[in-house]
Image: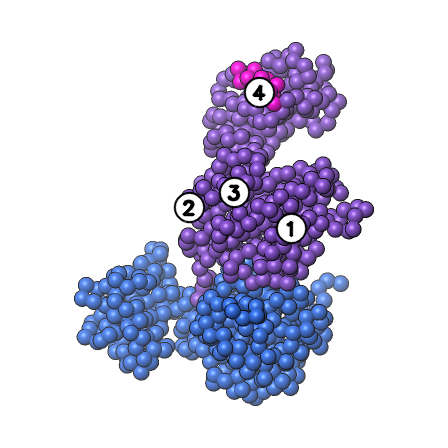
Chain colours: A blue, B purple
Amino acid sequence: MSSDSEFKFLQDLLRPNDSKIILLVLDGLGGLPTEGGDGATVLEAAETPNLDALAEQGICGLHEAAGTGVTPGSGPAHLALFGYDPRRFQVGRGVLSALGIGFDLQDGDVAARGNFCSMDDEGCVTDRRAGRIDSEKGRELCRLLKEIEVPGVELFVEPVKEYRFVLVLRGRDLSPDLGDTDPQATGKEALPPKPGSQEAERSANLVQQFLEEARKKLCGQDPANMVLLRGFSSRPDWPTFQEAFGLRAAALADYPMYRGVARLLEMDALDCGQSLENKIELVKAHWDAFDFFYIHVKRTDSAGEDGDTQTKQAQIEQVDQHLPALRELEPDVLMVTGDHSTPAAMQSHSWHPVPTVLWAKNARPDAVKNFGERVCIAGGLGPRFPTTDLMPLSLAHAGRLRKFGA
Amino acid sequence: MSSDSEFKFLQDLLRPNDSKIILLVLDGLGGLPTEGGDGATVLEAAETPNLDALAEQGICGLHEAAGTGVTPGSGPAHLALFGYDPRRFQVGRGVLSALGIGFDLQDGDVAARGNFCSMDDEGCVTDRRAGRIDSEKGRELCRLLKEIEVPGVELFVEPVKEYRFVLVLRGRDLSPDLGDTDPQATGKEALPPKPGSQEAERSANLVQQFLEEARKKLCGQDPANMVLLRGFSSRPDWPTFQEAFGLRAAALADYPMYRGVARLLEMDALDCGQSLENKIELVKAHWDAFDFFYIHVKRTDSAGEDGDTQTKQAQIEQVDQHLPALRELEPDVLMVTGDHSTPAAMQSHSWHPVPTVLWAKNARPDAVKNFGERVCIAGGLGPRFPTTDLMPLSLAHAGRLRKFGA
């Protein structure tokens, strides 16, 4: 991919060396004081001796991924962690889903997220997720859709998980400028894939043909007798992570969506299990092959979304126990943070800034002596810094940026 | 008015609901440690149990309206509080004055601030404010000027207060690109209304004709025998507050200038008295009709300008006593701050960041336990944040912004 002026300034300063950077992301890490408790957040309440030691030796603060007051989705928030301003670098869900399952998305392909859904005889959606059919059933239905042929375009239908799949169109002069067919509510008819421009009319027609064939193929199935499509998008022409920062990067993430973001930047998304232990083993095994290791822990976010403070706390404490294994690898820079806050009290992502610690031998420690939302306010990184600051900071502490000017 | 790309990002995230936001502005709130005292600022010295409680439960910080080191006027500072970057959104004093007195300024009108002044026989200004004539005299002289007719343009002359008035030109193809006639010093001749472009030449000529007629009308008057004009401007084409943030807004401000800024954004400037009690009553009476209530308290600033620390402190303490009445309304978000600092020690506006507290049920409280300039430095909003952050922050805490990306 082509380079980009956005990164030009840093690129000119890049100085390669053998340093290693680890970014450990606890999804949805930040929270709010829990109700009925002693006013502590889950992170503050958790027993985290190793994170506390890291905070004492490192530099702390809280970051905002997509600007003040803005609640970011995991996609934009991760792009910010990787140094890409998510307000500028926007990408559709179709592309993220396709990359997330490891689909080899090529330039010019148009990808969409698909849901199997239930429709009544009048064509109104009665269940947008078709009763959340299981993955086995989803794969079976995808095999039916794979049989569809539309002249003038190559089609790919790939299962993701349960009722979700990816549709990819490959061919000449396709446009992703198409509206969702998902009406986002039950009791309504599915929408046509509305073209947003003249160039997209042919693509809209091709998708419409696919939908008509899909209706025939799924006719008689119960409950999943139709599909909904959204997030039509093509792979954007962005600088890769290696082009932007000169780092060979490995992603240790088991969830499709996070693997998708990593692949979008042409990071190497290694096959890994869900456990942090397994991910750390893989980091160790690939230590020489990469400069940057992104490790993702999902369950802190899921627990927050469920309002389950106990599980969230247990997850954080478990990560804390694995921290010595990461430090034993002797990285030059170790960052621990979240992509966004997911307060259990809100059971959703939120706009609240995310606690962060950056450890390096040459970091200038601040007064923060343990790891929590409120103590991080006094940290050297500041109480509300842009998430995209983390990449230049980690490059600096890794000795990978030379002096600017004389 | 047309929409604007500046606000596009937030607009796309807006999610309407029934929440209520209150912004209470103590004009010129911030100060400096008073000389000879115990080193406390006026705000720090004031007894403010209710503001302190708000600070303890909310999130604090200090804001800068027009960038670091810049002392803002009240107009730009208020625009920043309302979410409009004042370095980008600049408006002439003529427009603010006209809107401030409730003049129905239309698109294409050109407005200027007028001063009655004293001139000697050589046409040199001897007093730019004509001995500060009283409002009665001002109105009488305006009646004389209202008689002036200039072919090709409709003229409006409206008294403001004392020696100040507003001149509005209405007609086709007018341009506000005209220089001030006020030489800004005594002993100098008034300047001609110099056109800044070719398109403004006709307008300059029309204003010149008005000035010649004004000289004749005021001839023989003492001390106000002439006028000075400045701040020629037209109503700018900005998104309204409601367009930008999806909020129906009421302004509770008695001073013309602040009503003018509110009207510029098409807020509803309710008729109100000077007392905070009256303003709070009106908020209560209009609670269902609006989503956002801006309440302005002027006397903290006036006292600061007079170097009168006692009055400033008394004013702050009076506001504190009214705070429970505001909280009883159960707003979703309550912000208390100033537009700029007016240290009594300086007797003028200053660049010093302005103490701020934002309270909401879903705010993440910081360690700040009372309301003052220096304790706010440790607040979660940061020690020098852009004033324009307050609008997205209040929208977020009011649940009015949906997630960005997935």
Disc 2 residue type (three-letter): Asp
Disc 4 residue type (three-letter): Arg
Disc 2 or 1, which lies upstream in sequence?
Answer: 1
Q: Magenta segment range?
A: B135-147
Separation of residues labelled 2 and 1 (CA atoms): 29 Å
Query: Toward the viewer: A92 or A228?
Result: A228
Q: Which mark is residue A214?
A: none
In the displayed structure, would residue B217 be above or below residue A330?
Answer: above
Residue matched to label 3: B280
Disc 1 residue type (three-letter): Thr
Magenta run includes residue B139: yes
Disc 4 and disc 1 in contact, CB within 8 angstroms: no
Residue matched to label 4: B139
User: To which quarter of the image does residue A53 belong?
Assistant: bottom right
Separation of residues labelled 1 and 3 (CA atoms): 18 Å
Q: Chain of mark 2?
A: B
Residue matched to label 2: B288
Disc 2 or 4, which lies upstream in sequence?
Answer: 4
Are the residues flagged by discs 3 and 4 from a single subunit? yes
Percent of width and height locating residue A41: 56, 70
Task: Indicate which label's residue lies in the foreground, 3 or 2.
Answer: 3
